[in-house]
Amino acid sequence: YTRPGFIQKPGLPHPLISTIEKIQKIFLRLGYGIAEGPDIEDDQHNFSDLNFPTDHPARDAQDTFFIEPIHADNPLLLRTHTSPLQIRVMSCLNPPFAVIVPGRTYRSDAPDATHSPIFHQVEGLVVGENITMSDLKGTLSFFAKELFGPDFKIRFRPSFFPFTEPSAEVDVSCVSCSGKGKISSDCRVCKGTGWLEILGAGMVDPNVFESACRRRGDRVYDPEKVSGFAFGMGVERIAMLTHNIDDMRNFFENDSRFLEMLAS
C-alpha cells in the first residue's frame, strides 16, 4: 500500500516584492544603482538634515514612531520616509551619481483602505552638474511609460516638500479609463479627473546639499556647483494601480487566494 502523493505548490513572490523588482529593473536600465539604509533613523537624518523646521507637524509623536528612551537632542525613530538615504548616500559618494532606495517606512497612521503604519517606498536621487527639471520630467515620463504602458502620460502639479525646491506631485493618466474620465466623468478610479497621483518629486533643495557638506566636512556638494533631483513613490500605491486594488490592507493579510489571484 502506498499513500497518495501530494501536489507541491510552488511559492510565488509577494505582489509588493514583484512591484519593487519591476521598478528596480526600469531604473537599472537607466544606469541607476541601488542603495539601502537602516529602518531605525535619528532625528537629524530623518528631519533636520532634510530641511524640516523644528515645528513641522511630521516631527510630532502623533505622526512618527519614536523609540524610547527619547533623547531630546537627537531621538531615534522608525524612519518616516526613505529620504534620509539622500544624506547617507551623499556622505559616501561623490557626484555624479544616480541611485534608487527601496525600503520599508513607518508612520503613526490608523490602518484603512489607503493608509498603513508600515508601507514601502522607492526613493530616487540624481546629483551632478547642470541637472535640471527637464531631466526629472524626462526620467519620470520614461518610467511611467515602461511601468504602465507606452500610451500613458504624466503631468506635474506644483507642490511643497521641505527637501526639494521647486517641488511637484506627479500624476499618471488613469489606468482604468486611460484618461477618458475627464471627458465622460464616470470613472470610479480617478473620480472623473482622468489622472492618478503616483509620486512626489522636485529639485534637491540647496539646504540639503549644505547638510551633506557639513556631514562630509568639505564642499563637494556646494549648491553653487552641483544640482540634482529627487523623487519618491509609494510601492503599495503603484501596486494598487497596476492590479486595480482598492484596499491596501489586502497586501498585508496573507490571504493566499488574493495573493494567488495577483500572481496569476
Image: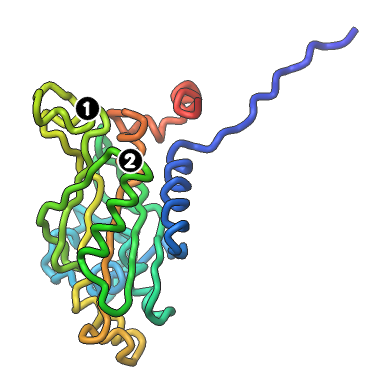
Which residue extends farthest bottom?
218
Q: Is residue 73 above or below residue 77?
A: below
What's the residue at 27%, 58% (across, down)? 138
**Residue 65's x, y, as percent?**
29, 56
Q: Which residue is mark 2?
A: 150
Judge depth for marks 1 and 2 and give the one in front.
2
**Residue 32's x, y, as percent?**
43, 63
Give the quarter of the image for residue 158: bottom left
The answer to whether one can see residue 71 in this image is: no
Whether pointer 1 and pointer 2 mark residues with C-beta atoms closer than 8 Å, the reply is no
What's the residue at 26%, 67% (across, down)? 229
Q: Secondary structure at mark 2?
A: loop
Q: Which residue is mark 1?
A: 177
Point out which mark residue 258 bears: none
Foreground pick, 207 / 29: 29
**Residue 202's x, y, as percent?**
20, 63
What amino acid type should be assigned to the residue bearing mark 2? Pro
Q: Is residue 61 above or below residue 71?
A: above
Mark 2, Cα crowd under 10 Å, few <14 / some 14-19 / many 20+, is few
Which residue extends farthest front?
151
The answer to whether one can see residue 87 in this image is: yes
**Residue 115's x, y, as percent?**
26, 40
Mark 1, Cα crowd under 10 Å, few <14 / some 14-19 / many 20+, is some
Q: How many marks?
A: 2
What amino acid type should be assigned to the residue bearing mark 1? Cys
